[in-house]
Amino acid sequence: MITPLRAAVLLILSGLVAACGPADTPAEDAASDVRDMSIAMDTINPEPREIIRPIHGTGTIAAAQTSDIGPSVSGIIEEIYVRVGARVDEDEPLFRTEIENYELAVTVAQAALELASARADLAQSELNRATTLTARGVTSEARLEERQSQLRIANAERASAAAALQQANKNLEDTMIGAPFRGVVTARYVDEGVYMSTRIGGGLGGGSAVVRLQQIDSVAAIVQVPEIYLAQLRLGMPGRLYIDGLDQEFESEIHILNDRIDPLTRTVEIRLGIANEDYIVRPGLFVRAEVYPDARSALLLPRRAVAGPSNSPYVYLLSDGLAHRQPITLREHDAEFIEVLSGLAPDDLVLIGPNLPRLRDRSAVQVED
């Protein structure tokens, strides 16, 4: 049985034993406090990399050639051989103008030539006779000169008649219009029976076209690019085209670089050709283009290492165990990285990690191994 006196003695002895146990030093306590207050972070170096930044533009697909084709001679359109969508080869008939009047014109011109030739032959005979008589002294020199003039007139009339016959034959030939190149009929403006004149303002549809023909076995993407990229553009620069309504992409290059800058849109025009033997790409389609300038050196940093608003971004650098706020200027690169234009060097230690929102300038940082 423990008496009250013995219990008191035991309590005093236990207190003395506890007082003689180990205790932390003030320095160890301070170090422990610093570790508890430090923010766990990782570090990363900005990554130097050779990059190609695509230049983007939009535009429209155009045919290699487009011709609105009308008659070469005036008259009634007698027959049209093609419909919209027809694919034709070069010189294949498209339409024909009524030929009766032109056949008659050829007949008349042939008769006129025969008459002029007969007159020229008669004038030659009369000149020969006058020459003989003049040599005998029977006729005068004036009569001889008259016969010479008549022959020159007759020969000129024969030449004129020959030219008229040649023109009549050409007009008859021109009643048939063939395709000037291999292509597709994309419009038909009139039907048979319409009178069309080749004179501007003459007749119904004067000077108008019968059909539209487009060459689309090769097409061009006519693309507008902001003028700020002009210095980077060059002929032969590779590109990729994305065309509305088509699933595939088309590889190409800049074939034409227009020297003119549009003063309204502040854009420059480039043209990229596409081989289109299967006619899958149609004129008028909307196209998006990416062209790829030469590679350049850049300093890239993950987006998740950047803090602050878009107009004044910054990062935190590690120095002497503390975070130091460093303003930077940047440019968009892709969904994961930004391009650092100024404010960082490749050997800088940039703090990164899930605790980034907790950092403040000169925050204590504990970098995890």
Image (tube, rainbow, N blue to C red):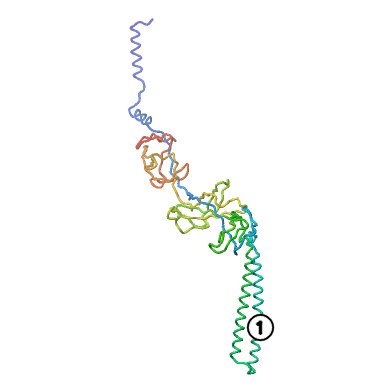
Q: For residue 177, what is the image quadrant?
A: bottom right
Q: In the rendered view, tell whether residue 193 sits above or below residue 48.
A: below
Q: Position of residue 136 (x, y in %)?
A: 65, 94
Q: Quadrant of the C terminus?
A: top left
Q: Residues within 10 Å of mark 1 (few under 14, many from 20)?
A: some
| Residue 307 seen from this side | yes
Residue placed at 61% from the left, 84% from the top? Answer: 150
Residue type, mark 1 in image? Leu
Q: In the rendered view, tell whether residue 240 sits above or below residue 159.
A: above
Q: Nearer the viewer, residue 196 or 294?
A: 196
Q: Position of residue 63 (x, y in %)?
A: 56, 55
Q: Nearer the viewer, residue 69 or 125?
A: 125
Q: Position of residue 213 (x, y in %)?
A: 59, 57
Q: Which element is circle 1 on?
A: helix
Q: In the rendered view, tell whether residue 144 sits above or below residue 85.
A: below
| Residue 67 seen from this side | no
Specify whether 334 is left or right of 180: left
Residue placed at 53% from the left, 62% from the top? Answer: 201
Q: Residue furthest bottom?
A: 137
Q: Position of residue 239 (x, y in %)?
A: 52, 52
Residue placed at 59% from the left, 64% from the top? Answer: 74
Q: Quadrant of the N terminus?
A: top left
**Disc count in the image?**
1
Q: For residue 306, what is the image quadrant?
A: top left
Residue placed at 62% from the left, 73% from the top? Answer: 164
| Residue denoted by label 1 | 122
